[in-house]
């Protein structure tokens, strides 16, 4: 994460500024592109008690939890698009748009997540209660940032129409979801049944859309926040992920974010205006998508592509550094409010 509104906002800026030849692919496949911008987080919505369990922790692999190469599945998607460019240009264009949306998510996470993880607490603290609090503060920060971005856009949550922006048509689902599953499996060379991975992706898509819809239900979110306060934080993580009346909103100044230590290196990171962080994410994403378009068009080779699409951790922003190497944090006081 950031949450979905932030990712779609950043993806929209990238679509307006990217290579002129790429732009039509993104706008004519707008839902696919927007879905790509949130797709890396899909599997975090797929918690299940009953039914088929995923044999692979795809969400952790995508984010580089154990120092995985976080670009392998993106390259696999681009290879699919490149192969189909002449024989099936419509599907090729859809896959390109999805991959580019995915890359905007990677760019945003690698810029934002070091700051978010540092200012919300240590996910890997020895104390399990502290780990739980860090996760709930993380959700709260990102929900409040979504609200701030809505303010920058002069839009309400209802006017943004989040669910409609990422709801694929039946044709788009057939084109994108199996390709996403196949890219994960073949890109990372994991020996797991192809149909199993496809089923997990389909289910994660359905669950994500359902849960994201619930988070936008204002009466429900208000009730959950109220109940969570009455129960002294029993549902912090769930309550903080919904678009409810969070007290922290009034105390988080997204135009003057304080400096905080990098979660791995401990070096001071400048906070400042969140719009400056957005611009950094946009610049990185534009570099990613423009070179990806050149690769899809056959203008450059794989080595040239990979010189730009480096295996960055989506959690700490460093190249192939494990997530549990994060140890430094300075929690923002506003995030202690319920």
Image (cartoon, rainbow, N blue to C red):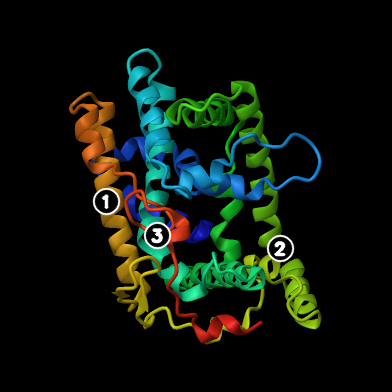
Residue 90 position (above or below residue 121): above
What separation in Å lies between label 2 and label 3 (alpha carbons)? Answer: 32 Å
Residue 114, located in which quarter of the rendered image? Answer: bottom left
* Precedes in sequence: disc 1 or disc 3: 1
Q: Residue at x 37, y 12 (%)?
A: 87
- Count neighbours of disc 3 (C-alpha within 10 A) and say few if under 14, some if 14 to 19, many if 20 or more: many
The residue indicated by pointer 3 is 316
Q: Residue at x 62, y 69 (%)?
A: 136
Secondary structure of residue under mark 1:
helix
The one nearer the camera, 47 or 149, is: 47
What separation in Å lies between label 2 and label 1 (alpha carbons)? Answer: 33 Å
Secondary structure of residue under mark 3:
loop
Of marks 1 and 3, the one in the foreground: 3
The residue indicated by pointer 1 is 17
* Residue positioned most to the top: 87
**Percent from the top left, x then y, of residue 127?**
62, 71
Residue 336 position (above or below residue 205): below
- Left or right position of 188 against 192: left
The residue indicated by pointer 2 is 217
What separation in Å lies between label 1 and label 3 (alpha carbons)? Answer: 26 Å
* Precedes in sequence: disc 2 or disc 3: 2
Q: Residue at x 52, y 30 (%)?
A: 176
The C terminus sits in image quarter: bottom right
**Percent from the top left, x then y, of residue 272?**
33, 79
Residue 274, located in which quarter of the rendered image? Answer: bottom left
* Residue 267 seen: yes
Secondary structure of residue under mark 2:
loop
- Count neighbours of disc 2 (C-alpha within 10 A) and say few if under 14, some if 14 to 19, many if 20 or more: some
């Amino acid at each position: 994460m950031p949450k979905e509104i932030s990712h779609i906002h950043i993806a929209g800026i990238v679509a307006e500024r990217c290579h002129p030849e790429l732009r039509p692919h993104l706008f004519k496949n707008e839902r696919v592109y927007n879905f790509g911008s949130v797709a890396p987080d899909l599997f975090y919505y797929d918690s299940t008690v009953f039914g088929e369990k995923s044999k692979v922790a795809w969400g952790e692999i995508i984010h580089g939890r154990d120092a995985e190469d976080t670009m392998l599945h993106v390259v696999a998607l681009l290879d699919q698009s490149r192969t189909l460019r002449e024989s099936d240009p419509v599907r090729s264009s859809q896959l390109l748009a999805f991959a580019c949306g995915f890359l905007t998510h990677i760019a945003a996470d690698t810029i934002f997540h070091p700051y978010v993880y540092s200012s919300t607490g240590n996910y890997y603290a020895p104390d399990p209660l502290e780990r739980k609090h860090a996760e709930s503060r993380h959700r709260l920060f990102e929900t409040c940032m979504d609200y701030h971005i809505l303010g920058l856009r002069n839009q309400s949550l209802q006017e943004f129409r989040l669910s409609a922006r990422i709801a694929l048509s039946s044709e788009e689902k057939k084109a994108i979801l199996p390709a996403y599953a196949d890219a994960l499996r073949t890109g990372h060379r994991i020996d797991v049944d192809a149909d199993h991975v496809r089923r997990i992706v389909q289910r994660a898509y359905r669950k994500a859309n359902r849960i994201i819809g619930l988070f936008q239900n204002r009466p429900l979110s208000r009730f959950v926040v109220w109940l969570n306060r009455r129960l002294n934080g029993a549902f912090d993580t769930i309550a903080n992920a919904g678009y409810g009346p969070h007290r922290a909103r009034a105390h988080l100044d997204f135009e003057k974010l304080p400096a905080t230590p990098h979660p791995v290196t401990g070096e001071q990171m400048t906070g400042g205006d969140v719009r400056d962080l957005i611009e950094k994410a946009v610049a990185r994403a534009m570099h990613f998508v423009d070179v990806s378009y050149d690769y899809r068009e056959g203008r450059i080779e794989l080595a040239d592509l990979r010189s730009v699409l480096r295996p960055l951790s989506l959690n700490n922003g460093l190249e192939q550094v494990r997530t549990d190497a994060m140890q430094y944090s300075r929690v923002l006081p506003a995030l202690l409010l319920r």
